[in-house]
Amino acid sequence: MASAASAAGGLPLLDGGAPLLGHIAQFFRDPVSVLKRGYKTKGRMFAMNFMGQRMNVMLGPEHNRFFFEETDKLLSIRESMPFFLKMFSPDFYSFAEMDEYLRQRAIIMPRFKAASMKQYVPVMVEESLNLVAQLGEEGEFDLIQTLGPVVMDIAAHSFMGREFHEKLGHEFFDLFRDFSGGMEIVLPLWLPTPKMIKSQRAKKKLHGILQSWIEKRRAMPLDPPDFFQTMVETKYPDGRPVADEIIRHLILLLVWAGHETTAGQVSWALADLLQNPAYAQVLRDELAANLGGGDGGNLSWEHAIAMEKMDLALRETERLHPVAYMLSRKANADIEREGYTIKKGEFVLLAPSVSHRMEETFRNPDAYDPERFNPANPDAQIESNSLIGFGGGVHRCAGVNFARMEMKALVAILLQNFDMELIDEVKPVAGATTYWPAQPCRVRYKRRKVEGAAAAVDAVALAKAAGCPAHA
């Protein structure tokens, strides 16, 4: 029987909503379960009630394509994530007018092309080897607690330079953790909650730190220029200098978005491999063919590009465990879609957490099968807009190639150096937050007997101690 909403032309309303609150309480307790229930009972299009606000969910590649193509047209990204405006500013990046957004995006996109990406691989390798040295011969580590700081170290080192990373790395990480608390999607942003107060205080301090480093780099330019020096000196195509505020926002955005996504994704990737040791061995064989012996310190851009099996594994983890379990927009006008009407002002949601596990799109969707993405496989499943863990369309994550390269380096070096096994059951964190593995999620490890590994790690430490310019 059609609900009242369906009879009026809206998407079928999910059953089980509470009086007044609707589905909001159960959603924020376990959003993915609610979204899966909606798909199972209502199909690829359904609505939820959040205290009278209709949240329209669309699932599957065709709806994904519509969502991305209509962003900034029928669908607004600006009005769907008000927390972003408070963390950054109303005229910044995705929330600026389209012409200004494209100008700002053009500032950073060249930094993620192949020519620039090659400069970051040695940093990724160095920070991964630092972790290997810290872990020692054997012991235990928690996935998020251990890999999260490494991801932040790689970002700070790559985007801000070695000196910034070594002098302010830990302070920057602590401030950034407070700043990230501003990603509030439940409570009104005007409420002076402790985490919002901490976020705004951290934002002010971070902007002060970044401004001082901008001024330092202008006074003493780095030659050859690194990522940060290039940002400081960049100009718009018409010759206008980029405002310092925009540079500060861009750095914060890259580190924030990269950490939130990559820390969770690389943790899930390693967890998936430890639960599927046969494919972990496939990757070790690929590493042996590409790198030979040693600890992985010789890993280069060319090696990483050649790691095709590793790429398949990372894509399968993105499919099974998208850390952004939901993407949102707001309707700018009434939208007719497959016989239903989404009214102006209503929210429109994609759910990678559900779309990625639809049997219509992916064969045996709950199984870990990286080979499903292998183009050499006659049964390969590579439909356009079916894998959306990094978004899509003009607003697709600008740093996706950086993130994948970073994950390749970190996972490769851990596999090269350690035998590992999971101690705890792996499950996602509870609640409406970034979909990371819940803690504790511990790994027991022991150093592998790999020829040249210990010597290479010691060489990095000795070079630093001796004041080697490459490790200064």
Image (cartoon, rainbow, N blue to C red):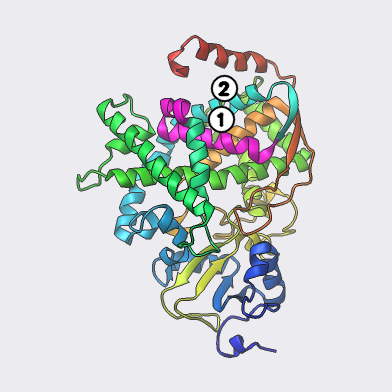
Q: Nearer the viewer, residue 189 or 443?
A: 189
Q: Secondary structure at mark 2?
A: loop
Q: Are marks 2 and 1 in contact (CB under 8 Å)?
A: yes
The amino acid at mark 1 is His
Please state the horizontal and vertical placement of residue 205, each as a whole percent of the image: 40, 41
Q: Which residues are magenta?
A: 142-168
Q: Given the current orientation, which residue lies at the most extreme top position?
A: 466
Q: Mark 1 packing: few (<14 Cα in 10 Å), some, or many (20+)?
A: some
Please say whether residue 138 is one of the residues in the magenta stretch.
Answer: no
Please state the horizontal and vertical placement of residue 146, each as a whole percent of the image: 64, 35
On screen, residue 201 versus residue 438, left or right, reads left
Where is the N terminus found, in terms of image quarters?
Answer: bottom right
Q: Say above or below: 178 vs 61.
A: above
Q: Secondary structure at mark 1?
A: helix
Q: Which residue is mark 1?
A: 303
Q: Say above or below: 430 vs 288.
A: below
Q: Nearer the viewer, residue 135 or 61?
A: 135
Q: Given the current orientation, which residue lies at the most extreme left position?
A: 239
Counting residues from the start of the chain, the first of labels 2 and 1 encountered is: 2
| Residue 282 seen in this snapshot | yes
Q: Say above or below: 227 vs 135.
A: below
Q: Nearer the viewer, residue 208 or 333?
A: 208
Please state the horizontal and vertical placement of residue 176, each as a whole percent of the image: 49, 42
| Residue 182 seen in this snapshot | no
Q: Which residue is mark 2?
A: 298
Which residue corresponds to the image point at 74% horizontal and 38% vertical from the top-left?
Answer: 442
Q: Mark 2 packing: few (<14 Cα in 10 Å), some, or many (20+)?
A: some
Please say whether residue 158 is one of the residues in the magenta stretch.
Answer: yes
Where is the C terminus found, in terms of image quarters?
Answer: top left
On screen, residue 242 versus residue 273, left or right, reads left
In terms of image quadrants, where is residue 132?
top right
The amino acid at mark 2 is Asn
